[in-house]
Amino acid sequence: MPRPFVLPDLGEGLVEAEIVKVLVHEGEVIQEDAPLLEVETDKATVEIPSPMSGRVETVHVVPNQTVRVGQVLVTFADAGAPAGKQAADTLDPTRRLAPETKTTVDNGRARQTPASDGPRHEPAAAPRPPAPAPTGPVPATPATRRLARELGVDLRAVTASGPGGRVTDDDVRQAASGQPASGQGAVERPSAPVRDSAPAPAGAPRPLATPTAEPPLPKFEQWGEIERQPLSHLRRTIAERMTLSATVIPHVTHFDRADITDLDAVIARNLEAARAQGVTLTLTSFLLKAAALALREHPQFNASLDAAAGELILKRYVHLGVAVAAERGLIVPVIRDVDAKPVIQVARELAALAQRVRDGKAALDELRGGTFTVTNIGALGGTGAIPIINYPEVAILGVARGRPEAVVRDGHIVPRLMLPLSLTFDHRVADGADGARFASAIVRRLEHPDQLLLGL
C-alpha cells in the first residue's frame, strides 16, 4: 500500500522549508536512512534521510519549492511491488492498513513513531488528503493574540494569510465577523481601513490606526531599466523575523567603550600556545565569556517576555548565539553553557561551529535555544552599529572594530586600544539604568582579563 512521507515538525515554530535537492527518483528502491531530500529552513540546510525502506512511488516536490510542515513530500510503495499494485492495494477492502505514524526531526534526522493504536480509515485515492492540522502554538504576534482575546476568537480556528503561516490582525477580524462581542452587538469587518470603522461612543479612547500591509510600490521601470531578483527562502525568513522584532519590541540602545589593551596583550602572548592545541584565540570568544558572566548578574537580559501572560521568563541557562556571516546569509549558531566553560573551550567550540555554518553542515540543534546574541562586525570595519534583537530574546550586544586612541590615564595622555560596544535591549523588560549597569559589567570583565580567565 502507499506510504506517504510528510515534511516533519522542525521545532521552534518553524512551519515551512524550501526544497534544495531531491536525491531520489520515482521507481527507485531505497533503504531506510538513505538520503532522500535536502531542505533549507531559516536555520540551516538539512539532509532528510528516508524513514523507511521501499520503492519511491511518487515525488511530490521539486527544487526551489516551498513546503509546509505536514505536506506530503514522497509516497512510498513496498520495495519490489510491481507497477499498479498501489491501486490494487487501495481497492482491496480486506487488506490491513499500516498504523498511522508521527514524524519528527531530531538533530536533523527524520524519525517516525506510531501515533496511536486506534483504527485508521483508508484515505481516498484522489484527491490527495490535506496536511494534518498543526498541534503547536499558532504563529501570531502578541498584539494579534490580544486582539483575538478581545474579540473572543480562537486563533486555531483562524485561516492565516500572513508570511510563514502567521495569523494577522485582519485574519482575526475576518474570523470575528458576525460573532457577538462582549456587551455589544455583532462585530462587523470593515471594508475600508480600521480608521474608517464606525465611531466609538463618546468618551471612549480611539484606537491607533496602524497599517497592516506595505503600500504599493511605484512603477520603477518608468524611470529606467530594472531587474527583479527573487528572495531566497533564508532571506525571506530573515526579513520576516526582523520585521517582527522591530514591530513588536521597543528597542533602545546603550553605547559604551571598553579598554581592551591588556586583553589584546593576553591574546597575543597566548596565540601560539593555543594554536599548538588546535585553537585560534579570538576577541569574540572573550566577548562571549564576558557577556555570559555578566548575564549571571543581570538575569533580566537572559530572558524572554511572554506578553500574552504578562510574565518575564528568566532562563537559568546561558546559551549564547553568535552571528556568523555565511555565503547564503547571516546565521546565528548557539554555544551552550558559556558561563560554565573556560575561554579556551569556548574558542574551540566557536571555531568548529562557525566552520560548520559556513559549510552548510550545522545541525538544527546547534542553531536553537539561544538566550542572548553577540554580533561582532569589527573585522568588516565601521565605528558602531545598532543591531536588531533576535526575537524572542530581549537583548543583543553589537561590537565594532577596536582602534588605538589617545586616552587620559592618571593625568597623562597614553595610547590605548578602545572597543566600541552597543547594547540593544527590550525597553519593556529593562530601563536605561539597567542597560547601563549590564554594559558596565561586560566592560569591567573585558578590561580585567585575569578575572575573565578565572570566570569572575
Image (cartoon, rainbow, N blue to C red):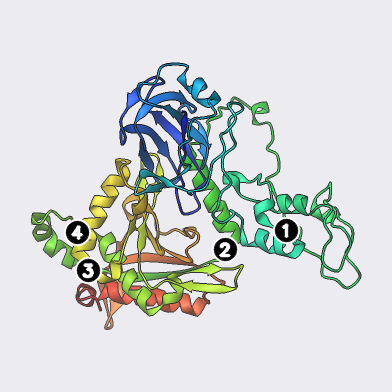
The tag earlier along the polypeptide, 3 or 1, is 1
Q: Which residue is mark 2?
A: 249
**Looking at this rendering, what residue extends furthest in the bottom direction?**
410
Pick the front one: 259 or 20: 20
**SS under mark 1:** loop
Identify which amino acid the numbered label 4 is placed on: Leu
Left or right, 172 with reference to 57: right
Nearer the observer: mark 4 or 1; the answer is 1
Residue 153 badge: 1
Q: Residue at x 71, y 60 (%)?
A: 148
Residue type, label 1: Val
Tell me residue 150's x, y (percent).
Answer: 74, 65
Which residue is outermost to the front? 94
**Which numbered disc, 2 or 4, marks the residue closer to the eye?**
2
Query: Closer to the camera, 337 or 49?
Result: 49
* Neighbourhood count class around disc 1 (C-alpha, 10 Å): few under 14, some 14–19, many 20 upward: many
- Where disc 2 sits, the SS reads loop
